[in-house]
Image: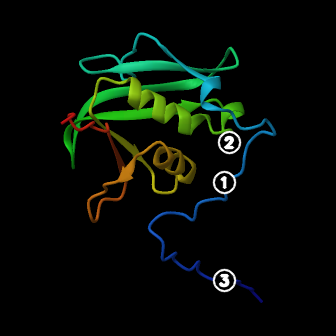
Amino acid sequence: MVRTTTTPKRKRSARDTPKPRPVKPRTNEPRVSASDVLLIPVPGTPGKGKGPGGEKWRIEVGGGRAGEVYINVIDEPPLGCHASLQIYLNIKSQGRGIGRIGYAKACQSSAHETIYAHMRRSNVASRRAAEAAGFTDCTPPGFKQLILRWRRATVPPAA
């Protein structure tokens, strides 16, 4: 007698993207203050801040390297030509508030008036950090990737 077993088919998720994992600090280190985070301008490399309108900084905390942040001017749909910011933190530096400060300081240090950040919708930590730095959601309807925008505050002329 031949015995066959069938495994039940997996139910298709109703989500477009996987459910994000809970955001937990990766370290027991305390959160940092804005005065502890330094952005050191460095020469850009191809694809990372080198080229027309590009900028790059090394992120340092307590004298040690915590990551990098850079801006490239790219021409991609749905926005066309625009300044796009990317930030990368070392694993030990994640979960300490460094990303929030890095986003904000890079935007303020930049020559660009408007900066965009592109990320996966499931990247909850980066979204929270960008929003804390003043980015707002400007994703067009039906576009899968999350697009956030930062605009430099303009000061009205004195009367």
Of mark 3 and mark 1, the one earlier in the sequence is: 3
Give the color scheme: rainbow, by chain, secondary structure or one colour.
rainbow
Find residue 126 and report its horizontal and vertical position in percent: 52, 46
Q: Which residue is mark 3?
A: 6
Name the element at disc 2: loop
Which image quadrant: the N terminus? bottom right
Q: Is residue 119 left or right of residue 97?
A: left
Residue for point 21% across, 45% down: 79
Of mark 2 and mark 1, the one earlier in the sequence is: 1
Q: Which residue is mark 1?
A: 23
Measured along the vertical axis of the image, is residue 82 above or below residue 56? below
Find residue 133 and report its horizontal and vertical position in percent: 47, 42
Mark 3 or 1, which is nearer the eye?
A: 1
Kind of residue at disc 2: Gly
Kind of residue at disc 3: Thr
Name the element at disc 1: loop
Q: Which residue is mark 2?
A: 95
Query: Contact, CB < 8 Å: mark 2 with mark 1?
Result: yes
Find residue 54 and report its horizontal and vertical position in percent: 31, 21
Q: Is residue 51 left or right of residue 129?
A: left
| Distance from Cα at disc 3 to Cα at disc 2 | 44 Å
Name the element at disc 3: loop
On the question of residue 146 being in view, the answer is no
Observer-nearest of 146 and 101:
101
The image quarter containing residue 80 is: top left
| Distance from Cα at disc 2 to Cα at disc 1 | 8 Å
Mark 3 or 2, which is nearer the eye?
A: 2
